[in-house]
Amino acid sequence: MLIVQKYGGTSVANVERIKAVADRVVRTAREGNEVVVVVSAMAGETDKLIGLAHQLSSSPSEREMDLLLSSGERVTSALTAIAIESLGHKAMAFTGRQMGIITDTVHTKARIERITGERARKVIEEGFIVVVAGFQGITEGEDAVTTLGRGGSDLSAVAIASALNADLCEIYTDVDGVYTTDPNIVPEARKLEKISYEEMLELASLGAKVLQTRSVEFAMKYEVPVVVRSSFNDHPGTLVTKEDAEMEKVVVSGVAYDKNQAKLTVMAVPDRPGIAAKLFKGVADANIVVDMIVQNVSSDGKATDISFTIPKTDARKALKLTEEIAKELGARGVALREDIAKISIVGVGMRTHSGVAAKMFDTLAAHRINIAMISTSEIKVSCIIDSKYTELAVRVLHDAFELEKAGSSKPGKARSAGKRKLLY
Ligand code: ASP
Ligand code: MG
């Protein structure tokens, strides 16, 4: 098998950890596999480099930031190759450029366009273990080094696995896999044996920080089988893969939460065409990502409230901007709430079962947790609640859907395929 193994920052945090990584890599190779390794920078290194730049300038140029940040992964790739060689196995470290990772020109969050990888293919055939510096690429024509956004080594690994047609992409981290929820909040949280790409994508974007969201999108698009597992033990981890019939039987696979959102309400907006367009164009133009939106019909045909959520880091900027737009539109004013949290339940089985959302609302109500906003997709229900109830909500939902039990469903009723898209 050709296996891509990616090791995150805590897995290469120091010389001892790098030795342990080299041991595992060589063991995998001696079991008869071809191995390509992708590494992150040592834990905390990227933040440290960002801190250094900010001591020199409040707005360092993005081109130079990319060059700076890419150095963290170069260090660990070379050290890991050295450690592998010292165990008596041939190894060669590659930067993103040497690997032929071609990206677009969007500095600090570039997208991978293609991977040439010729040199790597050749040396793999010659029996080398290739160690690639994650998180980085090079623009077409090789003018500039780019980085792929925070957590981008996951994307490097998945993209390399796809380009090399690897049989498996293993993501080594400091947790044993993907859990039904945050084990720090619910000690009974259970490690999932496998999860579908779609569910993983929802969980990743909802703040379950095991995998970078874009790496999951990429894996789903190119059907790269991914395993999330720990570099600190030999437990099997969680397989992220295509949905199968077995997964559909489980209605809710996980409970996620996100405390990094804020809610803006524009009050008494005139109820006429073009208002929402104007408001959200203004927000989008400022590069602020809107998540949930709620607008009701006005009861008197004249004015209505529009609420929406945005990342907390953009809250002040969005408030100022929205106040200006609100004034232009003749709205009464804008209210900002930062003490909110988004709680979500995720599961592909929701497509074929009813009563899931109702059960979620019922469970929250039974614990006197008020719901401020609701949004749903085919495989997810999210509620905005008071942030002080986050842990309670996670616990009671995990309990209500019996997620501590393997293969638990306790759904509503299974429905005929004809009604698949209805949630409740
Ligand atoms: N070192 C980079 C970061 O901290 C990339 C990665 O670790 O995946 O975001
Ligand atoms: Mg990471």
Image (cartoon, rainbow, N blue to C red):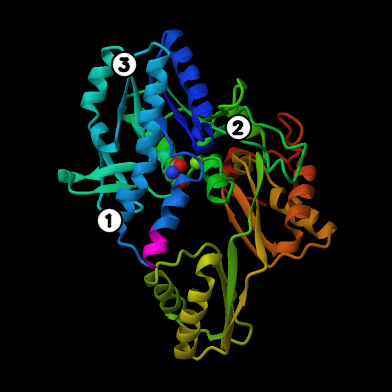
Name the residue type under label 2: Gly
Q: Is residue 36 magenta?
A: no
Tag 3, which secondary structure?
loop
Is residue 253 shown above or below 318? above
Tag 1, which secondary structure?
helix
Residue 172 can be seen in this image: yes
* Residue that appears at 22% across and 49% down: 144
* Residue that appears at 74% across and 46% down: 185
Q: Quadrant of the N terminus?
A: top left
Residue 311 can be seen in this image: no
Q: Position of residue 68 (x, y in %)?
A: 33, 50
Residue that numbered label 3 is attached to: 128
Tag 2, which secondary structure?
loop
Please report the bounds of the magenta region as a residue range.
53-58
Q: Position of residue 399 (x, y in %)?
A: 79, 43
Q: Earlier in the sequence, mark 3 or mark 2?
A: 3
The numbered disc on residue 177 is: 2
**What is the spatial separation of the Cα atoms under label 3 and label 1, in whole angstroms?**
32 Å
Residue that numbered label 1 is attached to: 63
Is residue 346 shown above or below 127? below
**What is the spatial separation of the Cα atoms under label 3 and label 2, in whole angstroms?**
29 Å
Q: Earlier in the sequence, mark 1 or mark 2?
A: 1
